[in-house]
Image: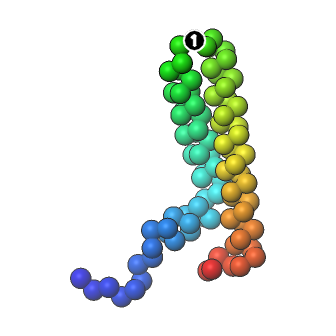
Amino acid sequence: MVDDGVTAAPASTMRQWIVENKLKTVGCFWLSAITGSFAYNWSRPNMKTSVKIIHARLHAQGLTLAALAGAAAVEYYDRQYGSTA
């Protein structure tokens, strides 16, 4: 097998995909956050259904804000240092 140095590192490839698809990344993160939060809250039997839904939404909102902050940091980094850095 010939290694000509063209293959990018997995982290670099993932970073490039995230830079190109910021909104998809945040949307997928929100979907996984709300799904995980629903699963966690449904495992707690002593809570009312309405409280479980509210908690799941709040957890997903907080995680989405964190994802948006991360996307903003990536955008700032790319503008400051260029996308080749």
Quarter residue 37 falls in: top right
On screen, residue 51 above or below 40: above
Badge 1 is on which residue? 46
| Residue 28 pos. (x, y %) | 57, 46
Residue depicted at 59% across the width and 61% down the height:
18
| Residue 54 pos. (x, y %) | 69, 23
| Residue 2 pos. (x, y %) | 27, 86
User: Looking at the rendering, in which quadrant would you find the N terminus?
Assistant: bottom left
On screen, residue 78 above or below 28: below
Residue depicted at 61% across the width and 80% down the height:
84
User: Looking at the rendering, in which quadrant would you find the C terminus?
Assistant: bottom right
Q: Residues within 10 Å of mark 1 (few under 14, many from 20)?
A: few
Quick check: 74 left or right of 38? right
As helix, strand or loop, the secondary structure at mark 1 comes to loop
Which one is in front, 11 or 6?
11
Quick check: 22 left or right of 17? right
On screen, residue 4 above or below 60: below
